[in-house]
Amino acid sequence: MKEKPSGHMLLDILGLISSRLMLVVFGLGTGIITARLLGPHDRGLFTVLLLLPQTLVNLAKMGVAQANVFYIRKRGASVATVASNSLVLCITVSVVLLATCYVGRDWFIAPFTKGAAPAYVLLALTAVPFVLIESYFLSILQAVENFRAYNLQSVYKAVFSFVTIAVALLALHGRLWAALLSQMLVTAGANLWLLYQVRQVAPFGLRWDGTVGRGTLEFGAKSYLQTLAAHLHYRIDIYLIAYFLSPIEVAFYSIAVNMTNPILQISDAIGTVIFPKLAGSSDVDAHARTAITCRHTLFATILAAIFYAGVGSQALTILYGDRYAPAIRPMLLMLPGIIMISLYQILTRNFTSRNRQQVNIVAAVLALGVNLSLNVLLIPRFGIAGAALSTAVSYTLAALLLLFVFVRESGATVRGTVVIRATDLASYPRMLAAAGSRLRGARGTAR
């Protein structure tokens, strides 16, 4: 595929960050409404039940999202073929996963959903096939660099989540089932729209290509452990808090996570745009792009974390109310870990783009092991502050391991990878001017 110029790439990044900022705004609005109208106990259950289908899908999606990008960009696979295979996998995996959940519900679901009615758990599980669609088909839009549709799917989902949950909770007096139902309907609608958008790019159907299918599953198997370990690393603290403590403590901790999520959107947006470019580059070019991207991403993330350290405490109590003040301490403890997550997210893209997922797997499994061990030790003793500290320590170790391997393989220096340069800062006005020129050109063409 033809390489886009740097101004266009910056425009993609700015567009993705803008859409993520909208997600943050509406996500915070949804969080505030649910916190204030559900109360801490039901807000905690709501958090676990929404997280459940995400975790189950990560247990079963087999790294197909990363494989889709790799096969379209690196191997030149037909977009229609990849999309058709993805649809077949969505249906197959959903059936198997839901059947497994039914059989094993008392073993691996009930211990973490204490206090939730079985009907609520069942309602949450209806999201599973739609979450799979989101994972597989967003990756196809990412591979073809259709970031307009990619962004719109996320924005529509955030806006309608906010609107429907506000209406549901206000009309039905803060009922948990109403909040859950509204979110399941929005998830279904947003991802049916996603299927339609991909079909506009390349018509697909319910058919299976064995050659491409075997290749994507083989590649995905390498990414699977990495993405699963990364998800569990990021979310295992919620489940352990639910297991050791109570839904109320889950609510406090989830509010702390929600408050820091806007910072993570920086590295996630940049990583999303840069990944298909890395996958289509030589190793030398991929290393150079990665080092530059790490410097810019760390710089922006550190600035955001410093800002949060100054105003985050006041903002939290203003937005969520004084009864959520226990979330302040874990929020502040998370900030060093958030900075290291940004480095981790960029470096993992480099290794995946070069089919070197084994490095990511080692880092992710190490981090998960450290995080799990520290959480088991610290949550019973220090509560949710212990969970925040565990996450910060484990992500720091994982990011440092990836940085060590990246420096050794690329020939770059640590300083050249993580410290912003004067020339980097000087490039901002030029890149912004180029992005602005392209934006004005796009508007002129639209007219």
Image (cartoon, grey):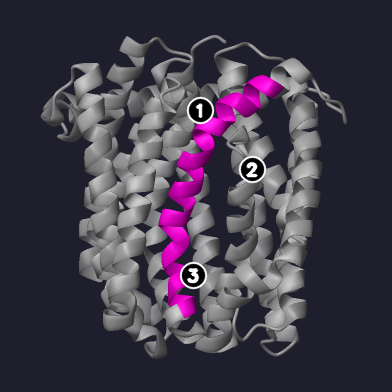
Would you call the spot at circle 1 few (<14 residues within 10 Å), some (14-19), or many (20 or more)? some
Residue 348 x, y percent position in the rendering: 38, 34
Residue 333 x, y percent position in the rendering: 24, 67
Is residue 410 or residue 7 the one in the foreground?
410
Q: CA distance from mark 3 to mark 1?
A: 44 Å
Of the numbered discs 3 and 2, the one sitting upstream in the chain is 2
Q: Which residue is mark 3?
A: 239
Magenta segment includes 228:
yes
Q: Secondary structure at mark 2?
A: loop
User: Disc 3 or disc 1, which is closer to the eye?
Assistant: 3
Residue 250 x, y percent position in the rendering: 46, 78
Q: Which residue is mark 2?
A: 61
| Residue 314, visible in the rendered structure | no
Is residue 80 placed above or below 284 in the rendered structure? below
Quarter residue 185 falls in: bottom right
Marks 3,1: beta carbons within 8 A: no
Magenta segment includes 153:
no
Q: Which residues are magenta?
A: 214-243
> Label 2 is placed on what type of residue?
Lys
Q: Which residue is mark 1?
A: 439
- In the image, what residue occupies the spot 48% across and 78% down? 243
> Label 3 is placed on what type of residue?
Tyr
Give the side of residue 83 with respect to residue 246, left or right: right
Marks 3,2: beta carbons within 8 A: no
Of the numbered discs 3 and 1, the one sitting upstream in the chain is 3
Give the side of residue 304 with respect to residue 356, left or right: left
The image's mark for residue 368 is: none
Would you call the spot at circle 2 few (<14 residues within 10 Å), some (14-19), or many (20 or more)? many
Q: CA distance from mark 1 to mark 2?
A: 36 Å
Of the numbered discs 1 and 2, the one sitting upstream in the chain is 2
